Amino acid sequence: MTDSLTIATWNINSVRLRLPIVERFLQEHAPDVLCLQETKCPDGNFPLAALRKLGYEHIAINGQKGYNGVATLSRRPFLAEERRGFCDKGDSRHVATDIAFAGDKLSLHNFYVPAGGDEPDPEVNDKFAHKLAFLDEMGDWFAGFSSPSVVVGDLNIAPYEHDVWSHKALLKVVSHTPGECDKLEAVREAGNFQDIMRRFVPAEEKLYTWWSYRARDWSAADKGRRLDHIWATADLGATATGMEVLREARGWEKPSDHAPVLMHLKA
């Protein structure tokens, strides 16, 4: 039995505000599954009808008003759903779904890791302390994983030298500080996950998924960071046939500051 599956991840920065570009993306690229982060929408206000109209009948939501929030939209039924809280904060940063693939199933974890504020010092910045604690808790949890799994989302860290426009300039900037990068690597290694994006783009090549709204011409300046990630256990990583960052979506009308990332599996 052969099967193919395309999974996309996108920090949408308000699903209701940017519903037109979500619809455009689904119509033009039609992934089997789309994982959204920073939906900023309570569950009762999520635009279910508009997305189901496009064929995404199965939608798992973990939302809250005005902040955070994750949602997974799928053409395939969910075999199970889970929402996990981290750091006892009561915020909505994770949803997991089991999806059939190649005669078996995979567990798909959709994350929105805390951004961490501006000051990379947990002693004076509670937001940064929260981010580090969140990563520690992720790592402890992943250490017990054994089933075929995929982790996607806005992990809010660009871990490698060429995941940022300037390694030297950003070493003391939250999202690329050595401590954060080391912790994210520890999280990935705890679950024995492969970095699918870097499987298809060599480590010495620049790779970005986020460009600040502050840049007058974001594309020309190209001061990006790779904050969005796709990881997979080795069994699923072996079925990955491609990956792409849809950079053009960063230039769509009323865009998110993140671009969608797609992974293609075939088994």
Image (spheres, rainbow, N blue to C red):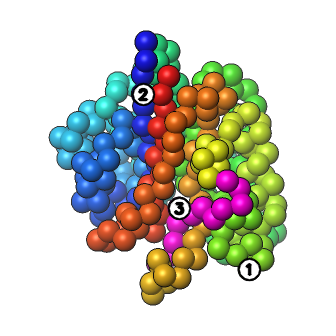
Residue pictured at 81% horizontal, 61% vertical: 179
Considering depth in this image, is 112 or 186 the residue closer to the camera? Answer: 186
Relative to 132, say whether 54 is above or below: above
- Amino acid type, mark 2: Ser
Point out the tag, 2 or 3, that comes first from the N-terminus: 2
* Residue 4 circle label: 2
Q: Is most of the magenta stretch helix, strand or loop?
A: loop
Q: Residue at x 47, y 77 (%)?
A: 219
Kindly give the residue lying farthest to the bottom in the view shown: 216
Magenta span covers which residues? 202-214
**Amino acid at circle 3:** Thr
Which residue is identified by label 3?
Answer: 209
Q: Residue at x 26, y 55 (%)?
A: 24
Relative to 102, does residue 18 appear above or below in the rendering?
A: below
Q: Is residue 176 left or right of residue 110?
A: right
Contact between marks 2 and 3 (CB within 8 A): the answer is no
Which quarter of the picture shows residue 55? top left
- Closer to the eye: label 2 or 3: 2
Tell me the tag on residue 8.
none
Q: Horizontal placement of 147 versus 4: left or right? A: right
Q: Is residue 179 depicted above or below 37 in this figure?
A: below
x, y percent for residue 170: 72, 75
Q: SS at mark 1?
A: helix
Query: In what element is the residue under mark 2?
Result: strand
Q: Quadrant of the N terminus?
A: top left
- Residue closer to the observer: 182 or 93: 182
